[in-house]
Amino acid sequence: MEDAILKVQDICKYYPGVKALDSVSFEVKRGEVHAICGENGAGKSTFIKILTGAIEPTSGTITFNGKTYEKLNPKQSMELGISVIYQEFSLVPYLTVAENIFYGREIKKGIFRDVNAMEERARELCREMGVELDVRRRVCDLGVAYQQIVEILKAVSRNTEFIIMDEPTAPLTIKETEVFFKIIEKLKKEKVTIIFISHRLEEVFELCDRASVFCDGKYVVTKEVEDLNKKQLIAYMVGRELSDDYPVPSREIGETILKAEGLTNKRVKNVSFELKKGEILGFGGLVGAGRTELVRALYGADPIQAGEITLMGKPYHPKSPRSGLNAGIGLIPEDRKAQGVVLSLPIRENIVYSILKKVSRFFFIDKKKEKDCVEGYIGDLNIKTPSAEQLVKNLSGGNQQKVVLAKAMATNCEILIFDEPTRGIDVGAKQEIYGLMCRLAEAGKSVIMISSEMPELLGMSDRILVMSNGMIAGELDRSEYSQARVLEMASSQL
Amino acid sequence: MKKDNKAVMALLNYGIIVAFLLMIVIFSIASRNFLTTNTAFTILKQVSITGIISIGMTLVLLTGGIDLSVGSIAGVTAVTAAICLKNYELPIPLTCIIALLLAIVYGALSGFCVTKMNMPPFIATLGVQTSLRGLAYIVTGGLPVYGFTKAFSRFAATSLFGIPLQVLLAVLLFVVFIIILTKTTFGRYLYGVGGNEEASRLSGVNVTTIKVMAYSISGFLSGIAGLVLLSKTSSGQPSSGGGYEMDAITAAVIGGVSLSGGEGRLSMVIIGVLLMGTLQTGMIMCGINDYVQQLVKGMVLIAAVAYSQFSQKIRNRMAAAS
């Protein structure tokens, strides 16, 4: 029981300009359930990817079952018996439970699959794990919790002794979570080692033996869960002092420009808030809390089922992104490459994409007007490129993001929504984007910013609304800001 | 290093022109009569119909779709016009308007299925292709429609400054659509929608309208091709236009139009069209039999797609290196 199945020593992972993991060392004991805690971006995912061989560490060693490795590749990792259960499932929806469990390793009789043997073995597994499940049912007909369980059965059938669970309970309801917990208890008895990652801190206390905390890519501490309470854990996760690389606000906040009352759709529940002229309103919360869905609904990209919006004193019913743009709302979407830019087109065509009609006479694009507009934004936003004809796919992430920004700014809207504006871009470009957001606010524009990076959220926002499970969990003024408060609110409605 | 890159880029971009010239040289050696103005006109006349169709195909491919219905639309338009002229003795202009309006409706139907019904373009247009072919057989009873006014055949028989009218028509349409693609907002949106549909939607572009327009224009141009065909043959054949979709897709792909949408130039599609026409006429003049011709055409399509995938890979690698 006391020996370490996994020991990592001085694991580092550097990306240009970013230390994703900085000298992480700790041990996982055989047969324990070990939680890894940390905010978004603390380095948990990077750490898992190194264990599964998806990425190579820059330096450091991994010792698994007494053998030491400099790096792992996916095949090695699988052969060592490391399994990962992600929140997105890796199951084939139209195959049965049994077929999924043995997918890729089918039991065969001659050249044919032996369905009976597979079903028999799958039933045995279910009995061992204490799960009631018809192994002949198609996976797509099962609820999320049972799909999760099939994933686990799949891992167990490979005689895995080491399972990594990355936010396994995120999509589950409370009742489903209970079923799931029972399985974990069973696995514990079978001496399977589990690394458990969850934003729901209650689960850490309920399930785990020990917890390790990451913060900003650094390993902080490992503690017996018995010796911890929630406050202490959050304190470890928050860890750092706020750095002062955020521009000091010197703007005047005006009157209400946008008022939403009782907004509701699939992922947003009864959300009401106000946005004022010249303010930066931050939205905090966990990934999947409904923040993106809320702003997409405001912009007209997603339908609204109920609720009222008043924009500049008039009722506003967004039907499509075009109606959002026409009403003076601009969106910088969270996924730059998939939603922000057309990678195969040059910078010039991307920047004027939303205002093509404005730079055209009849149906013909006025090259001169277009060029003036584009050159202006390349200069203003300091987009680093040899020319406006450069294809956007050849730009760095930061410069791509500036192109998306330029496109939104070109529409000359009064409200700009930034969804994770600095995700995956380097420090220099981050600073420029912060400066730009402040300039916009000072010029009397209103800014909504969604951010999962705590320092950014606290540093930039004039006011913070925290969302949890589709609802507004609370509001914080600058005087009340603390990372602990935001984290607490973010998990309050789960 | 930089210079090398430029040379490789140029070869990737214009390699097809080299291939085209090489083909002319080979056929000129193989057949003494190949390199004549007479052959040149034969080829031009022959490719004007598939050329017109390949314009519409290019538009649809740019949005990330594909249009398999073009040949059937050409065929059904030809028999519709033939029936209007023969059975109802409608005047020629009215006949053309009716036939072309219907062609637009067929295209719009594909567009509707692809956008509003969310069907994969391959399946939607395959369905339209098969239905329209059936329709052509139903309205004609499976028999060719001929014996209508000779005036209609005059178009295909007339030349202006020594150039056949149908060739001039194809050239005119290419010029118009090159301007539309490079200079207008609609052209820009076609590339944008094909390059990134979601980003286009979020940028306020009405993606549905753009796509439906692309398919409708493809239908319209296929209709024009059908009328030219009818004028040329003086007989409305229910089976006419079969296989045109293959020729048009091959021409567009040879011209560098990406099958995943968003990339390609119509000016280069002209080369693709000429290359396909030259290949066919060259093979006929060299006495290569029909079945072998078919085999070669299929292989050219496969080679063109393979080449375009390969050159994309090289481009990406070079972009990553720089």
Image: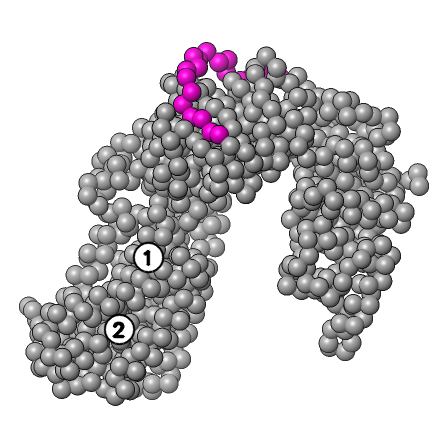
The vertical placement of B65 against A241, above or below, is below
* Label 2 packing within 10 angstroms: few (<14), some (14-19), many (20+): many
- Disc assigned to residue A431: none
Which residue occupies the extreme left position in the image?
A: B161
Horizontally, residue A200 falls left or right of residue A375, namely: right
To which chain does the residue with label 1 belong?
B
Q: Quadrant of the N terminus of chain B?
A: top left
The vertical placement of A249 against B11, above or below, is above
Say which amino acid is labelled 1: Val
Labels 2 and 1: the sequence-earlier one: 2
- Disc assigned to residue B212: 1
Predominant SS of the magenta segment: loop
* Label 1 packing within 10 angstroms: few (<14), some (14-19), many (20+): many
Say which amino acid is labelled 2: Ala
Q: Would you name the residue on which mark 2 appears? A: B74
The vertical placement of A18 against B48, above or below, is above
Residue B277 image offset from top left, x and y in percent: 27, 73
Q: Tell me the magenta residue range.
A: A242-261
Residue B320 image offset from top left, x and y in percent: 49, 45
User: Which quadrant of the view contains residue A269?
Assistant: top right
Horizontally, residue A6 falls left or right of residue B125, namely: right
Residue A359 image offset from top left, x and y in percent: 25, 37
User: Which quadrant of the view contains residue A489?
Assistant: top right
Residue B180 seen in the figure:
yes
Q: In the depicted view, which residue is nearer to us: B200 or A465?
A: A465
